[in-house]
Image (cartoon, helix red, strand yellow):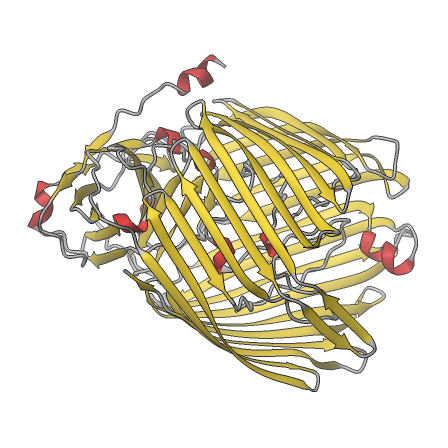
Amino acid sequence: MIALLFSLFVVNTKSVELRYTTEAPHIDGVIENLWLQADSAYDFIQYQPNDRMPASEQTVVYFLADDENLYIALRCNTPGREPVASFKGLEDHVWIYLDTFNSRSMAYMFAVCLSGHYDDGLLLEDGRVQDISWDYVWFFGQKKYDERYEIEIKIPFKSIRYKKGLDEWGINIRRWHIKDYAVTHWTEVLQQEGMQVSNFGTLKNVHPKAKGYYVELYPEGFFRYDRRGDSTDYRPSLSFNFKWDPSSQTTLNATVNPDFAQIESDPYTFNLSRYPVRLEERRPFFVEGLDVFRMSHLGLGFFSSLDIFYSRRVGESLPPPWLGSIPILGGLKFINKGSDWNFGALGAYTGEFTDTIGSDTLIIPDRGFAVARLNRAVFDNSDIGMMFSGTGTSRDDYNYALGFDGAYRAGPSQLIIQSALSDKNGKRGYAVSSGGIHRSSNFIAVGSFVSVDDSFDVADMGYVPWQGVTDLYLAAGPARYPETGPILRFYLEPGFVLTKYPESEQWSKFVSLFVEPRFRNLWGFNIYAQAGKMYEADTDYVYRSVETNVWSGLRENMYLHFGFDWSHRYNYYRSAIYDQKWIASQLWIWHWMSFMPVSQLSLITYGDFIMEWEPTGELHAITPIWTPRIEYQLNADMDVSLYSEFVFVTDQGKISTAEVYSNRIGFLFAWNFSPKSWLYVAFNNLRRDEGDGLELAERIAAVKIKYLIYF
């Protein structure tokens, strides 16, 4: 505890001064003599494969600025080898991190690869959560030499938010070396802690003088062809997006008549659990600023966050047999960020949806959505906050929730506490959730607690599906970070779980064990096992499960991730079909593999193999799901992908009887022809077996162009 408290007051001594120039450097990857006037960062420290070791390849980073832009140049030496550039495989690359509010919790991220690939995003929760969905206007150039490569970056001050009058920003630089698959940082990053914004160095003498902030006009043109059965529809549309930054800390976004038709459809999901599948957000208006409109996250899978706003509820896709999604008429979003206070408000309105299949008609009325979030930094890089979310179609049909949360962070340790109240058409409920992790040089402890009242309901605008459930999980054990040898780090966490489901008065009790070694050669695996007496679905049984994940780090031309989950549990999917208690074994095997035979080509395969047994012990069903995919990168800004998703069914679990239940073919051409400007050409064709072989269920062809006008 003393060490954790001490870590709050330790000041990183590394700093670099930002110097100013009246002559802007050429952003072409050639570090000219102009950069000799700049201060520089060097003496990088190894993070992988060995903590605290000096970098085997020298890196020097220079910093300049003028009134409008921040300039960064990196000279990355590669003595004895030629730098590696690869569109699809592993390549030399760098990351820049900027904490422009000195929040010690959130930072911008900018990545440049030697091939010309780039990425950007946000580092959140003091480094525990990454959000790479954000998109900025910035520029870079890169050039390869015999034994070094050079990168130049230009970041307009108008593109990023920062606290006015603050002359010191937090900063760190990360470099990936192909040699020995090493990772180095300018400021020290340890295996037991990971990247922490609170441990960044300092960029001094920051005085942006940019007048005004970017106004972004973002028109989108869309032409879509839909066919369902014998019905065909041709639909052109035009949407308009607007972004304005009234100040260096404030952003206003608006969208009118957006067409968020998915360029690539959500993958087929096979769900045996009692809870609905949570889908990833992909729509630009909701992706940007998504970090603001949620309560604090732990960044680890065992923590159940109270997500009282789930953006996929706005304009959500409809379940089969209905096809399509609810139209969004417009949306407005306001965000203000500071080093102490953050505030965000979002509103959206969806239009009426009507569809008829045979004699069945579905009518979904107009609906409005409203979300607001306020949080304040406390205790250096911790925070407290509150959040409101609500939706309704009329005064008699509404759903809203009010949430409160706090996150305490001390070094690599973190504790989160959340609570929420809900009201759906007069039915009120409450929920609480907390989670934490403590790390030291030889010990790790994790835990979570969630309790959701059976009247708590945010189904119309959030994702908290655990009505009536109380769950406690605690685990602790040794943690090791060897300085030498094949193991990079190792966790062993025995624990226990107590769970109470709404249909039972008894508490389910079982023990657990988590084991995870990670190796210096980038391979690793983990095993999570549980066993004990389970009371759920108005029955009881002996629950047991074993889950294993195995992965390889990304090598020059291959990445591999596979695993399985065997369990003896209640099968909600079969119970609903056969109207009986179905307690039996399940085996779920999955894989994801990518092979890059040449720099521009990826051959990818991923899929699942699900086996279900009957309560009598006989094999009942095998459901293979397989998706081969080909991706070809024409250049750094243009790529083509083609995939074919197969879902099979079997008769009485006999693999010899396997037949294709559905097949979805997808094609996508994407061209990032200008900052934040894209051309998409997409095709999706879904065929499904309705009893007489595969028949067309849905066909979509689309051309979409998004062009950014900014000034």
On the image, the x and y values in percent for residue 682 come to 50, 75
Identify whether 524 is placed above or below 43.
below
Given the current orientation, which residue lies at the most extreme left position? 33
Task: Between residue 34 and residue 248, name the one nearer to us.
Answer: 248
Q: Indicate left or right for 694 with 122 as reference.
A: right
Q: Would you identify the image quadrant in which residue 302 lies?
A: top right
Viewer-proximal residue, 194 or 613?
A: 194
* Res 674 seen here: yes
Q: Residue at x 35, y 50 (%)?
A: 245
> At which x and y percent is residue 222?
48, 75
Q: Quadrant of residue 186?
A: top left
In the image, 92 versus 207, the foreground residue is: 207
Of 213 and 652, nearer the camera is: 213
Residue 379 appears in which quarter of the rendering?
Answer: top left
Task: Name the residue at 74% across, 49% down.
Answer: 275
Q: Position of residue 234 (x, y in %)?
A: 57, 83
Would residue 201 be found to the left or right of residue 481 on screen?
Answer: left
In this view, which residue lies farthest toward the front?
395
Residue name at image x 58 percent, y 28 percent: 436
Relative vertical location of residue 59 with respect to residue 577 in this rendering, above or below: above
Q: Position of residue 521 (x, y in %)?
A: 44, 43
